Image (cartoon, rainbow, N blue to C red):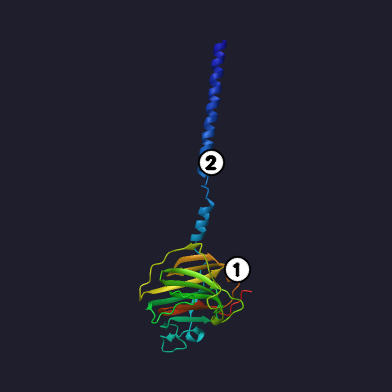
């Protein structure tokens, strides 16, 4: 065989090997792409976790008048049997109440806002607020967690806690000891219209407070250690709001202990 012909056969053989190798490489690359899953960034995973539904809430039962301990203000029962009724009216500017034989980690307030009270009384801070809300782990008037539905001057959910370890009466602590909790998730709320029914629900689970408005999760945040250290029952609060309401707490009621 001549040298020229031999070189031609060697070149053809080398080209064939290169084509086979390239084809195998393309097939392998396509298979990898078909099975590869897109990588999720830490940010997208965090966002999905915030939007995930929390554990199913417990079944709640309406509180009767005999179960409700009024610490400030006056309730009017809307039932003929005042001690066994579960629906109440508030016309006074300031209303505070707790359910002593209840756990303090969950409660629900079903209410209808009818408008502002007459007169209107500013808060101890001097600020004027119209609001309806829930008390959680309410040890007393100086040590409590609040989940409030602000009506005016601006609408929205506000969560704060009040901690004064050495004080137990509102007259002792006044406006001292308040800390506002910053949410990690929050949705805006529309202004309320008089006469429309609404539902406010709050729940503490594994150190996280979640607030629902009309069945939708609208606020969620981690409670600081000082707030989680509080112990006490659930309750409710209003400021300068005329409402008709029903308060519900977990059916398996009993004095709360987080020790």
Callout 2 secondary element: helix
Mark 1 — residue? 225
Residue 228 x/y as whole percent: 59, 70
Q: Is 39 situated above or below 137?
A: above
Q: CA distance from mark 1 to mark 2?
A: 48 Å
The spot of residue 107 in percent (x, y) is: 50, 75
Disc with the residue nearer the chain's start (1 vs 2) = 2
Residue in the image at 60% along x and 70% along y: 226
Quickly name the residue at label 2.
32
In-image side of 152 versus 54 (left or right): left
- For the N terminus, the image quarter is top right
* Vertical arrangement, residue 170 with respect to residue 154, above or below: below
Specify the farthest residue to the right.
259
- In the image, what residue occupies the spot 48% across and 66% down? 219
Few, some or many residues within 10 Å of mark 2 (<14, 14–19, 20+): few
Question: Which residue occupies 53% across, 24% down?
Answer: 16
Q: Quadrant of the C terminus?
A: bottom right
Toward the viewer: 13 or 211? 211
Where, by quadrant of the figure, is residue 143 drawn?
A: bottom right
Residue placed most toward the observer, 73 or 127 = 127
């Amino acid at each position: 065989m001549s040298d020229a012909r031999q070189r031609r056969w060697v070149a053809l053989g080398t080209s064939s090997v290169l084509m086979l190798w390239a084809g195998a490489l393309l097939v392998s690359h396509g298979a990898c792409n078909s099975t590869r899953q897109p990588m999720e960034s830490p940010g997208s995973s965090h966002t999905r976790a915030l939007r995930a539904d929390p554990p199913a809430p417990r079944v709640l039962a309406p509180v009767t008048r005999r179960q409700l301990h009024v610490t400030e203000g006056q309730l009017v029962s809307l039932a003929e049997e005042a001690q066994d009724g579960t629906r109440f009216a508030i016309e006074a500017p300031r209303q505070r109440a707790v359910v002593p034989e209840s756990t303090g980690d969950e409660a629900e307030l079903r209410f209808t806002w009818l408008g502002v009270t007459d007169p209107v009384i500013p808060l101890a801070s001097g600020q004027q607020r119209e609001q309806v809300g829930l008390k959680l782990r309410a040890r007393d008037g100086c040590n409590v967690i609040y989940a409030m539905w602000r009506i005016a001057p601006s609408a929205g959910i506000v969560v704060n806690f009040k901690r004064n370890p050495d004080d137990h009466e509102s007259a002792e602590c006044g406006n001292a000891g308040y800390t506002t909790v910053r949410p990690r998730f929050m949705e805006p709320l529309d202004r309320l219209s008089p006469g429309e029914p609404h539902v406010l629900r709050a729940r503490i689970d594994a150190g996280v407070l979640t607030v629902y408005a009309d069945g939708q999760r609208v606020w969620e945040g981690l409670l600081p250690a000082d707030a989680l250290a509080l112990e006490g029952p659930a309750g409710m609060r209003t400021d300068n709001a005329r409402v008709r309401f029903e308060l519900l707490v977990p059916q398996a009621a009993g004095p709360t202990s987080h020790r």
